[in-house]
Amino acid sequence: MNVNGKQYQSIWFDEALNSVNIIDQTCLPHKFETLILKTLEDTCHAIEAMQVRGAPLIGVAAAYGMYLALSENPEKVSPALERLLATRPTAVNLRWALERVEKALEEVSIERRSSVALATARELEREDMAICEKIGEHGATLLNEIWESKADKSAVLNVLTHCNAGALATVDWGTALSVIYKAAEKGIPVHVWVDETRPRNQGAALTCWELAQHGVSHTLIVDNAGGHLMQQGLVDCCVVGSDRTTITGDVCNKIGTYLKALAAHDNSIPFFVALPVSSIDFTLSDGVSEIPIEERSSEEVSHISGIAENGELLTVRMTVKDIAISNFAFDVTPARLISKIITEKGIFDAQESELLKLKT
Ligand code: MRU
């Protein structure tokens, strides 16, 4: 990804320093800071505190966490797997990536465990970049079709997105935003409506920052504005990511995605979900009843962070002190509301007979 004209990944291994590096996403958009993860606990903290977030990135970070854990103590494979698995419950890529490391460690001598975990993490990192670029290429063909069918060629192609499913949510490129980047590369004049995405504001803080770094036209909107924009003919399609998708095509993504899908359906606007095959949980068939929904701290709702005019970073409370708060981080969009699922393997309908083709 482009950061002030320099290429970055959200996570990378520095061979010269032998270090695992991340962009600290909790500092964005006000400060660009990178961090070195040195231990298993550093990695778990980074995932839990959302210094790294986004389903694919969490998976790769967890694989690096295994490397760091086994460098500390090569005997503790199971405790490290368990600790990492417990960091965030919803995104299935975490489990998927840890299973890849676990498999790679089978029949590996204790002395070689950390180096095998490192090799696997680096492989997952490379794979994720290639997968996300492919998702973008496939998805851009859908955006191109919509653009081609638009009568007014002096207009722009208006895409609405929710949360951050960009390069920051993966190693590079992103899923939903990869589709947008590839469409822009094709010369389609894309404009993105960015949902702010309360309570962590990944849209306002991360997606807007990322789109600005890539020179993609965008406008920040409050979470409740999407339906109105759709009714006014100001949205040509929606593209979002996924943290977990069932074999039947139900998609679990950041809280609020479901309401956007309902509004899109009511206004006959295509609703696309861009995701790597690693986000499909082939063991689940009903998203609403089977996907565990992460509940996060009430402070994410009662408090808000930002920068004061004097440059000071501040967190302030918006509510009275004693207040009941519920903070579900994800919701499930049923398959019937999804127009297409865009993967690295191509474009599919959100239904079991289609998604089964992706099972290896
Ligand atoms: O809580 P977060 O910020 O990890 O949630 C991220 C999302 O919901 C993304 O849309 C999802 O992970 C898809 S990212 C490619």
Image (cartoon, grey):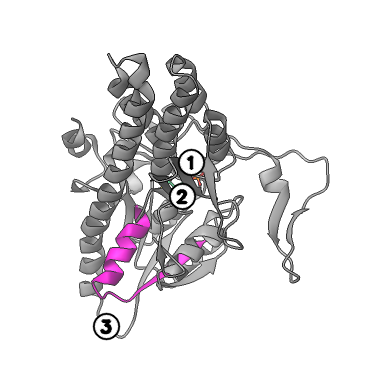
Is residue 255 in view from this perspective? yes
Indicate whether residue 179 is drawn in magenta: yes
How far across and down, in percent of the image, does residue 208 sit? 50, 65
Residue at 61% x, 37% y: name it. 296
Looking at the image, is 339 positioned above or below residue 55? Answer: below
In the rendered structure, which amino acid carries the disc numbered 2?
Thr
Look at mark 3 in the image and give the residue it sits on: 153
Contact? badges 2 and 1 (CB < 8 Å): yes
The count of marks equals 3
Task: Report if the CB atoms under discs 1 and 3 are less than 8 Å apart.
Answer: no
Q: Nearer the viewer, residue 333 or 254?
A: 254
Task: Name the amino acid, label 1.
Answer: Asp
Asked whether residue 205 is drawn in magenta, I would say no
The residue carrying pointer 1 sits among few (fewer than 14), some (14 to 19) or many (20 or more) residues within 10 Å by Cα, namely many
- Look at the picture and state if 81 lies above or below 93: above
Is the CB atom of the residue marked by disc 3 within 8 angstroms of ligand 1's nearest atom? Answer: no
Q: Which residues are magenta?
A: 175-195
Q: Earlier in the sequence, mark 2 or mark 1?
A: 2
**Residue named by callout 1:** 331
Q: What amino acid is found at the position of numbered circle 3 in the picture?
A: Lys
**Which residue in the rendered view is the most extreme toward the right?**
321
